[in-house]
Amino acid sequence: MKVVIMAGGKGTRITSVTKKFAVQYPELYNEAPDIPKPLLPIDGIPVLEREICSLREQGFDKIIITVGYLSSIIMDYFGDGTCVSRATGKPFGVSISYFNEAIPLGNAGALYKIYDDLKDGADEDFLLLTADSVFDVNIRRFVEYHKKKGGWATLFTHPNSHPFDSSVVVADMDCRVIEWLAKEDKRPVYFKNRINAGLHILNRKVLDIAVKNGTIVPELIGTSNSQGSVVKVDLDRQLLKPLCGDKNSGAIFCYDSPEYVKDMGTPERFEQVLCDFKVGMIKRKNLQYKQRAFFLDRDGTINKYKGLIRSVDQIELIDGVAEAVKRINASGSLCIIITNQPVVARGEVSDKLLGEIHDKLETELGRAGAYIDALYYCPHHPDRGFTGEISSLKINCNCRKPKIGLVVKAAKDYNIDLTSSWFIGDSRNDVLCGKNAGTKTVLLIGSDTDSNQHDGNKENGQFGQDLTCNSLIEAVEQIL
């Protein structure tokens, strides 16, 4: 599979930083007074070089770079990919070609200009990356997922700390994208924190369909229209967004991953990237490495205990929970909710309504700059006799806590080291689930938990847990 890296942006918001590093590392850039954003160094090695090395190490060595602003500096630095890095003294070990946008064509216009070069043998899929972000991801895993789904496009999606100024992706339970909400689009009051990270796998058919529909005329790209503006192509709004939910064309899927992807477009964000690199977070979050997770119960741990939750209005975050989740996020650990939801089997809450309840939970966390990486729920309930119950869900399953099916699934999905992870909850079942799975455990006994109403005080609240705390924030502070 060929790789296209978009590196033509001007980066006006970060000019003060690019000029500073051009002066600091004159030997890297042949004493150029300014450098393009993709050549900003992290520990002396340019961001784009780190990206290329990661691709090479994972077997992706055929690269096309689209360049524009200060293009000669990028082309001089990397050459055709066979030369030696000025930063490391090692060969790049890849094959690089370039498309130079003399006139900016938008973030997808160049794809039509290099259309014939995107195919690699019989493979019409290609990897489309941006040089505006710093990332370290298991690309092979991403590609395997794309091939398994068999769609025309797969978007790398993740939760982030600022979902209200990001493009939100709405998908069904099979991760098929049904709606794309850009920043300017009206969005629902509550939504899942699922953000397009700017890494894509596309099939050339995505380019073809826009031409077939008449929305893109390749010959006109780069020319002036009747208003005197240059005809450009926007990847999100003109190519991908129109395909969302379209049953007549190839599907777009999202690939949810907690791996490190961060926009470095402002001095503040680049400074955060440098800090994350220093503590090893960028590399550590790559899913080829074992992850540490905080498994959290839902009711009485994150939201106030109100018995069985049957409506969106009943969700109310416990004070301090958002701060606790933010600290988990900042530590580089995964934050995963594991919850029993027998209301589904009892026919009292549909999967759709449960999704809306969880959307509110994610939205309220997002308002505070916090996010969860994943949520798993058990819809089963072994007891029968409820009006409207769903008989197929009235079973003794392996996923209802204290059984460990959901924890095992999460561990497989995200390569989690259970022995270094924690399970935090407010009931006996939470503690036993964690112990059965091999994690360390915390029992919460505060006023907002269900401990007093449920079984927290039985056996004097001693179920073999490693810690007993009053709240999630107290537990996270002690652990971290």
Image (cartoon, rainbow, N blue to C red):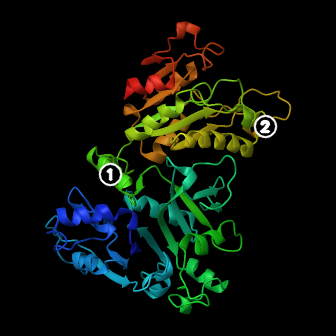
**Mark 2 belongs to which amino acid?**
Ser
Residue 285 coordinates in the image, percent (x, y): 37, 48
| Residue at the bottom extreme, as displayed | 219
**Mark 1 belongs to which amino acid?**
Glu
Q: Earlier in the sequence, mark 1 or mark 2?
A: 1
Residue 81 showing in the rendered view = no
The image shows residue 378, relative to residue 113, as above or below, that is above
The image shows residue 193, relative to residue 470, as above or below, that is below
Estimate the spatial distance between the alpha carbons at disc 1 and disc 2, rounded to whole Å. Answer: 55 Å
At 60% from the left and 66% from the top, the residue drawn is 252
Categorize mark 2 by other alpha carbons within 10 Å: few (<14), some (14-19), many (20+). Answer: some
The numbered mark at residue 391 is 2
Q: Nearer the viewer, mark 1 or mark 2?
A: 1
Residue assigned mark 1: 271
In the image: residue 87, left or right of residue 114 = left
At 42% from the left and 19% from the top, the residue drawn is 466
At 59% from the left and 60% from the top, the residue drawn is 183
Residue 444 coordinates in the image, percent (x, y): 52, 19
Residue 413 showing in the rendered view = yes
Q: Quadrant of the C terminus?
A: top left
Categorize mark 1 by other alpha carbons within 10 Å: few (<14), some (14-19), many (20+). Answer: few
Q: Of helix, strand and loop, which one carries label 1?
A: helix
| Residue at the top extreme, as displayed | 460
Q: Nearer the viewer, residue 150 or 325?
A: 325
Residue 441 coordinates in the image, percent (x, y): 45, 24
The reply to whether the C-beta atoms of the residues labelled 1 and 2 are less than 8 Å apart is no
Q: Nearer the viewer, residue 125 or 224?
A: 224
